[in-house]
């Protein structure tokens, strides 16, 4: 792949996302409280790192997922978003741990345990200490069931990152099946969506949450957002001259380096998954109770919010660069409803 | 540590386990069905491996956990026990993957996905294919909630093994806090106990299963059984001249190599945890419904059954060697109810 290519050359088609956008009016004041927390957190070492973490705009991000959450619930969930971006940047995607699975795995396992334990077990790691504080908020605000769902989702995410770190260590480019499966976990979608319930308050009954259709809808929402993230970060990384494992580099590795085809294939895959989400949601939603319907609505707000946040919000090298107005696609790149031929996800079309 | 020491020199005190033993009368016929399944599974390469997997006596093992399960439920859960021992022996504790986290993690992640997916996603790995078949049985026999609980527990186990493999790769001997936390996950107790519900049939309400006391009781049952397993495998490994990371080598690494002290410290730790289990169970059980009480009873059967199985059942170098009659301790090595001073578990005493 040519390293001199710029994002403008890639001709990404507009994103297709006919979902209602929303945002929580508490976001600005919650952001101020979050910044105060971050300043006490020890998560940043210098002004540049501080600006980067705050620049992830976690409060703005989760305000789009949970437009109706009250201030304390939006704060707690937004704190995890900031934390997740900081952990991702500092330990998963780049940095010492990001290519050393034998060190990443124990570190991540200790971080996970700090979340699970009500007692201090953070062993002096600032990330673990901060996560334990967030976990304590989730325990207070959420039910034990909601908390355990978040814990399980958080572990699923970390195992996905362990997978990614293992591939990075071996400089191994996964095939599409492996990549999609890994990304379902490594993207952080599972804990992000598991916070919807904590933000909303109402607990989704287990029989609804664990029903195959709701599980599949959650996975589709994760993959749609993950592929949208890949698009944003690929555009960003191509401009700065580095590209990690993502849907484009995976497809380029398979197709011999044809960028236009990779961009088109990725857009069609994303829209097939997203349309499946829309169709199955429509069919599933009426059978759920109020909390279950709110959860599915949250998934939809999340897909839309994640896409808007990714298109508008910095995390660019120059955060003062104005973001372009978003133009949305009027129709999907692929309107089909046939299963995507990847065994890991093709069962979504059987439901 | 002297490598010439034999198990007989170690003077293990008898185990303290005043819990009612039980076994499922269907075990012998379920074992025959399990062996037939194993013979089709592709999990063994030669007669020695076959004998070793069958010698784990998975049907006998889980018959002690679920004395009331019907044949089909005992079969499905027993199959996972055989599978788990085979996977443990072939890929976790020894073999190519056991010291290569960058390869173990993707392999284990694919195996986990094969379990999660109703569609074939096993990619030709005999372990993944076999696990997918077991998963299909759990889906048929269990509720979606029970199935997702098993999936989450299975992932927790595999992350524990990832941790263990990472330490093995670095020849790193963990300290006690890390070891206990790792063992809570790596021992396989989480998926084993998550099968209790599938064996029983009745679903434990989420509010009961995720209540802190029931979570803690599950963890205590895991750690008690894991420490008992350490005792059995240490005795076995000392005799064959190798010892892996276990509670004894961890304590020896801390105390400078005094075996008698390590054996006594391990016994006291195990009994403190076990007594805490008994006391909290007594307090928690009356507040639960029928399914929740059956789950707690299953944890107790499991602790006792695991100890008996470990004391009696082969997995010795020579399976025909007769096992000694079990002598149980009349009192615990440590009757105290003060918290074990390890932050990862000390909160069990706050409940």
Image: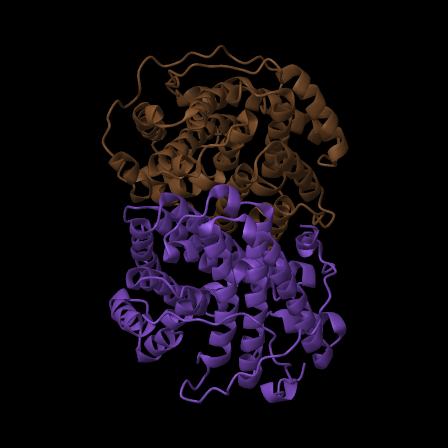
Chain colours: A purple, B brown
- Where on the picture, by quarter, is residue A260? bottom right
Where residue B115 appears, as percent x and y from the top left, is 62, 44
Residue B88 seen by the camera: yes
Left or right: B151 as drawn, with respect to B49: left
Q: Residue furthest front?
A: A286
At x 34% / y 32%, what residue is drawn? Answer: B258
Residue at image location 47% in from the left, 58% down from the top = A193
A325 on left or right of A114: right
Q: Position of residue B207 (x, y in %)?
A: 39, 38
Q: Is residue A172 visible?
A: no
**Relative to residue B183, is residue A307 depicted above or below?**
below
Nearest to the observer: residue B8 or residue A122 = A122
Query: Whole-percent x and y of residue B224?
Result: 40, 29
- In-image side of B279 versus A297 (left or right): left
Number of marks drawn: 0
What is the x, y in percent for residue A4? 62, 88
User: Looking at the image, is A179 positioned above or below residue B9?
Assistant: below
**Quadrant housing the N terminus of chain A:** bottom right
Where residue B103 sits, quadrant-wise, is bottom right
Q: Nearer the viewer, residue B263 or B117?
A: B117
């Amino acid at each position: 792949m040519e390293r001199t290519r710029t994002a403008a050359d890639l001709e990404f088609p507009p994103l297709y996302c006919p979902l209602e956008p929303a945002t929580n009016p508490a976001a600005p004041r919650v952001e101020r409280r979050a910044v105060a927390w971050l300043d006490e957190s020890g998560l940043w070492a210098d002004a540049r790192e501080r600006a980067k973490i705050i620049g992830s705009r976690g409060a703005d991000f989760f305000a789009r997922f949970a437009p109706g959450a009250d201030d304390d619930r939006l704060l707690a969930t937004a704190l995890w978003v900031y934390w997740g971006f900081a952990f991702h940047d500092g330990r998963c995607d780049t940095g010492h741990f990001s290519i050393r699975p034998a060190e990443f795995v124990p570190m991540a396992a200790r971080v996970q345990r700090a979340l699970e334990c009500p007692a201090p077990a953070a062993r002096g790691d600032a990330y673990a200490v901060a996560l334990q504080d967030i976990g304590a908020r989730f325990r207070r605000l959420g039910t034990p069931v909601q908390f355990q769902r978040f814990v399980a989702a958080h572990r699923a995410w970390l195992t996905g990152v362990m997978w990614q770190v293992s591939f990075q260590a071996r400089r191994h480019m996964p095939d599409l099946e492996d990549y999609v499966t890994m990304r379902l976990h490594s993207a952080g979608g599972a804990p992000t969506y598991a916070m919807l319930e904590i933000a909303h308050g109402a607990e989704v009954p287990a029989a609804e949450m664990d029903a195959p259709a709701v599980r599949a809808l959650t996975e589709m929402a994760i993959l749609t957002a993950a592929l949208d993230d890949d698009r944003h970060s690929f555009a960003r990384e191509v401009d700065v001259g580095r590209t990690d494992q993502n849907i484009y580099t995976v497809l380029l590795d398979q197709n011999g380096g044809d960028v236009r085809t990779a961009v088109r294939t990725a857009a069609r895959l994303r829209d097939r998954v997203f349309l499946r989400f829309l169709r199955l949601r429509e069919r599933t939603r009426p059978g759920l109770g109020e909390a279950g319907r709110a959860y599915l609505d949250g998934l939809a707000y999340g897909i839309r919010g994640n896409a808007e946040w990714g298109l508008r919000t910095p995390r660019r090298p120059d955060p003062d660069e104005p973001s372009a107005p978003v133009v949305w696609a009027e129709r999907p790149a692929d309107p089909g409803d046939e299963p995507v031929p990847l065994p890991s996800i093709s069962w979504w079309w059987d439901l």
